[in-house]
Amino acid sequence: MEFITGMAAGVALGVGISHMFKRLKPVQSKNKRFEQPFHSKNGLSKGPKVVAIGGGTGLSTLLRGLKLYTSNITAVVTVADDGGSSGMLRQDLGILPPGDIRNCILALADVEPIMERLLQYRFKEGSLKGQNLGNLLIAAMVDIADGFVNAIKEVSSVLAVTGRVLPVSLENVHLVARLEDGTVIHGESRIPEEQMKKNSPIKEVSMDNPNCRALPEVIEAIEEADVVVLGPGSLYTSIIPNLIVKEVAEALRRSPALKIYVCNVMTQPGETTGYSVMDHVKAIIKHSGANIIDVVLVNRSNFPDELLKKYRLEGAAPVDCSDLHKLRDMGIKYVQADLSDFSNGLIRHHPQKLAYEIIKIAEEAVKK
C-alpha cells in the first residue's frame, strides 16, 4: 500500500506537468550532413512508410534519426520486458511493460531536453525508488484512457510525436530461453545473467504463450510499409521476441516492403558473445523463417583503442564481419557503412548516420 500511495503521488506530478508539453518548441538537428531532405511537416508526410521493429535503446536510437526523414513511422515494440521499473508496474498493476514504449515515444517527440530528462527521471529514494516518472505517467493514462493502446495514443498526442508507437501484442507474455546445455530460463530480465553463469550459448527463445496474437494495427502497418527495419538492439531479448509472434513473422514474409536488418556494432555478453554477422542472421531466420531479411546493414568504423579495451574487459567485442560474403549464398545483400557514435564513452549506433543509410538503401532499391 505504501508503494501504491507513493506511486500515485508521482503520477499526479506527471499528469500535472503534462499540460506544459504543448508549449514546448521542437528540437532541431544541428548536424547538416544528415539533415532531413524535406523542409516542412508537409515534406515529412511524403516520406516512406517505415516500420521499425525491436525494443530497448537500439530502437529508440533508430527512431531519433528516422524522424528527420519521414513522419510515416510505426515503431513496433516488444512487450516481454519484466525487469526494473517496467517489471514492478507489470507486477503491481497488471499492465504491459511501459519502459521501451516510453523510450520510443520520447525518441519521436518534439520536446525540450529538460522535459525529456524529466520523463526519464528515476526516483532514488522512498517508496518510489527505482520507478521512472514517464512509466508512471503511462500507467496512469492506461486507466484514464481505458486501455494500453489508447494510453500510448494520448501520451503521443500530448508530446507531438512523429509517427506512432505500438506494442507488438496486448497479451501478457513472458520470454523463455533454452541454452545449449538444456537449461531453461524464464523471464527476459534473467536471461543474460543466467546465460553468463552457465556459460552456455542460447539455443532458442520462445514465449510462454506460443499462440499470442499480434496487435492488428501492427500487421496492417507491416502490410502497408515501404521499408521494414529490424534492429538494432539485443538479438534475443529485443528483436526476436517480436518475430516469434507468429502473425508478425507471417506478415513480414508476405510483405513486399524492403526488409533491412541492422546488425549490432558490438557483441552482447549474456546473449551474443563471439557472434559474427552471419550468426545474428541465422538466429533471426531460425526463429522466424526465411524471407525475413533482404539487406543487412553492417557497421564499418575504426574504434578508439581505449573504448575497445573497456568493452573487452566487460566481455564485448566488435561483431565479426569476416563472413559477410556468405550472405550472398542466402540471397541476402549487405551494405557496410560508418554508423558508430563514440560519445559518452560508449560504442553505439549514431541515430542520424543510421537513418541516412537506411533511407539511402531504400531509395536505391526503388531506383532498381
Image (cartoon, rainbow, N blue to C red):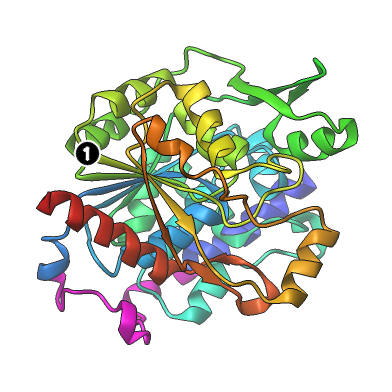
Q: Position of residue 96 (x, y in %)?
A: 54, 36
On screen, 299 above or below 75?
below
Please tell me whether mark 1 sits on a helix, a strand or a loop. Answer: loop
**Residue drawn 58% across the image and 40% down it:** 235
In which quadrant of the rendered image does the N terminus lie? top right
10 Å crowding of disc 1: few (<14), some (14-19), many (20+): many
Say if the magenta span includes residue 23.
yes
**Residue drawn 24% across the image and 37% down it:** 221
Q: Which residue is mark 1?
A: 257
Q: Position of residue 21 (x, y in %)?
A: 38, 73
Say if the magenta span includes residue 242.
no
**Residue drawn 18% across the image and 57% down it:** 363
On screen, 91 above or below 323?
above
Q: Position of residue 10 (x, y in %)?
A: 63, 61
**Residue drawn 19% across the image and 74% down it:** 37
Q: Amino acid at mark 1?
A: Ala
Closer to the camera, 300 or 21? 300
On screen, 168 above or below 249?
below
Q: How many marks?
A: 1
**What range of the chain is rendered magenta?**
17-41
User: What type of secondary structure mainly makes up the magenta span?
Assistant: loop
